[in-house]
Amino acid sequence: MALLNDEIVKNVTEMLADLTDDVRLVVFTTEKGCEYCKEIVQLAQEVAATSPKLTAEIYNFDAMPGKAAEFNITMAPAIAIVGARDYGLRYYGIPSGYEFSTLLYGIQRAGQGQAELDPQTMSFLEGLNQPVNLQVFVTPTCPYCPRAAMLAYEMAVASDKVIADVVESMEFPALADQFNVMGVPLSVVNGKERVEGAAPPYMIVNAIQAALA
């Protein structure tokens, strides 16, 4: 049974009609307690079928550690969204509910290769000379989470120093506990600085500056 009905397929097809670059959905599954791996694979394949610019690749995280390392995938299930180059867009877990829009947005950004940010934020990101890991903890039922996740993806496209890991916190409870995730969205910069809520760009910039200080 298809996960996406005809209306959703039509809407997704229209949303992704303006991709200029090919986009790969590189999916990593695991046999270790993965409740939604089957659905993640099916979802990636159904989304890929909506555009000739999209392809879905499926790998086993446990059996292919070299392939996982190639995409800097540290846990599974995961999706690497890769355009003309690897911008560092990652989604850990199943992008369902409100987070389906995050997946589509990531595909758009990777397929266009351009960020849509204010000039001040762009200038800051272009001047980065140290690596930044921006983790955004989300849940599928949170209507504010896509805003935080999309901003992280924008920043990763804008700077090759930024990696954006969007993490479905309920599927990775140990990681959520590690960072004391009490509410979502929560953005964590380099494992140090925390920004709660769907914060504007300047607050993420401030957190990056503090993390790199």
Image (cartoon, grey):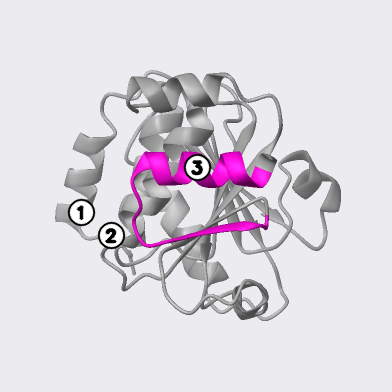
Q: Is residue 104 above or below residue 16?
A: below
Q: Which mark is residue 161?
A: none
Q: Residue at x 78, y 45 (%)?
A: 67
Q: Which comes before the other along the chain, label 1 or label 3? A: 1
Mark 2 and mark 3: span between their CA atoms? 39 Å
Percent of width and height locating residue 42: 46, 60
Quarter occupied by the C terminus: top right
Q: Which comes before the other along the chain, label 2 or label 3? A: 2
Residue type at tag 2: Leu
Q: Secondary structure at mark 3?
A: helix
The magenta stretch is 191-211
Residue type at tag 1: Ile
Q: Which mark is residue 8?
A: 1
Percent of width and height locating residue 138: 44, 66
Q: Residue at x 67, y 79 (%)?
A: 174
Taking the image as shown, residue 7 lies to the left or right of residue 107, namely left
Mark 2 vs mark 3: in front? 3
Q: Nearest the camera: 8 or 184?
A: 184
Q: Does 203 appear in magenta?
A: yes
Percent of width and height locating residue 208: 57, 42
Q: Does 23 appear in magenta?
A: no
Mark 1 vs mark 3: in front? 3
